[in-house]
Image (spheres, rainbow, N blue to C red):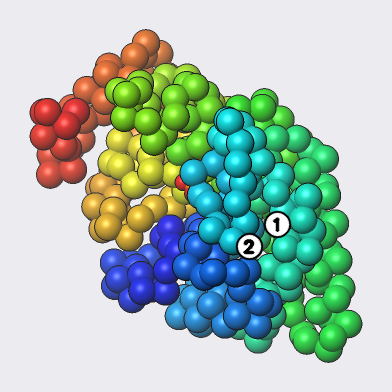
Amino acid sequence: VNIGLSGDITRSLDRGAEGIGLFRTEVPFMTKDRFPTEVEQRAIYREHMEAFEPRPVTMRSLDIGGDKALSYFPISEENPFLGWRGIRVTLDHPEIFLVQVRAMLKANAGLLGELRIMLPMISNLTELHAAQQLVAQAFAEVIEEGVRVKRPQVGVLIEVPAAVYQARLLAKSADFIAVGSNDLTQYMLAVDRNNPRVAGLYEEAHPAVISALREVARATHAEEKPLGICGELAGTPIGAVLLMAMGYHVLSMNATHLPKVKWVIRNIKRRDARRILAKVLHMDTAEEVRQFVNQQLIDAGLERAVPSRQAM
Ligand code: PEP
Ligand code: MG
């Protein structure tokens, strides 16, 4: 599940979440009027980890900037989506990153669930290596304090087109790869995801986006690393079928979509999904992709998963 508020824990588990694939840690930061302390962060993270134990919990490091603002840390830019956001902010402020990672590590102490730390907006290898060094530093500090913690998995969130072309290198250096298809779509198509005037151009089933997702899958498989996705696409029946065919191991989504997506992937054989994907990879437009995959779902008796004609 994708989560940010502890109020969503029960609903997520009730709906069958098998882990947290994306913890949007900026959400608890946004509800405060100052940076939460290490102790406060630890308590918030621990609540989620305990509730999900022994399932894995993927914590994204603070992803502010772009459309996500903290009242007590204003960022003013002409072009915020191309500006200071995600990992760029936390690498410039290692003290924020270190406190956060220490809180995550301590929150996970003594629990069985695996802690995965996910880095947003990575656009080059240097950022990954710098963040890995900081995680190692935080780990050493926590051990030094005498808290017994396990080494976390550190992964990259692929959201910037450049990262698609360096996916193999990133996968080699990281412990896992996940795709943030919301931002990846926005940056690939140069369409502001929040601008209604161009909303019609924002299209996750665009053949270029599908091709990028497949490229990331191939690169990550070549390095034999776990692969996930946590954008809205994963929570759609069309996306779920195509992503399953590409070999994505983790689909993470809003709790609302969990039962529907589970139902779809349990009723489509992987062999059939691969056949659908093979055809889709030769299609020219998003409309063609949507119509074709929806028809396949209908033919498989899954018409309840197909949105009404207007929504297609
Ligand atoms: C994404 O970009 O796809 C993503 C999961 O992150 P967010 O929607 O929080 O930017
Ligand atoms: Mg994002």
- Callout 2 touching callout 1 (CB < 8 Å): yes
Task: Pick the residue in front: 186 or 232.
Answer: 186
Quadrant location, the N terminus: bottom left
Q: To which residue does mark 2 refer? A: 116
Q: To which residue does mark 1 refer? A: 154
For image coordinates 30% across by 42% down, the residue present is 236
Give the residue type that dot 1 points to: Val
> Does residue 54 appear left or right of residue 253 in this picture?
right
Give the residue type that dot 2 points to: Arg
Q: Is residue 199 above or below residue 17?
A: above
Question: Residue 277: x and y, percent?
Answer: 39, 27
Can you see residue 279?
Answer: yes
> Does residue 57 appear left or right of residue 87 in this picture?
left
Quadrant location, the C terminus: top left
Crowding near the residue tagged with mark 1, few <14, some 14–19, many ≥20 C-alpha atoms within 10 Å: many
Question: Residue 79: x and y, percent?
Answer: 58, 30
Q: Secondary structure at mark 2?
A: strand
As measured in the structure, the alpha-carbon distance from the residue carrying label 2 to the one carrying label 1 is: 6 Å
Can you see residue 224?
Answer: no
Question: Residue 193: x and y, percent?
Answer: 41, 33
Q: Secondary structure at mark 1?
A: strand
Q: Confirm or reject: label 1 Cβ below 8 Å from ligand 1.
A: no
Q: Is residue 262 above or below residue 191?
A: below
Q: Where residue 60 is drawn, which disc sits there?
A: none
For image coordinates 73% across by 61% down, the residue present is 97
Q: Return the disc, 2 or 1, that comes first in the chain's sequence.
A: 2
Task: Pick the residue in front: 225 or 256.
Answer: 256
Crowding near the residue tagged with mark 2, few <14, some 14–19, many ≥20 C-alpha atoms within 10 Å: many
Q: Is residue 255 above or below residue 178?
A: below
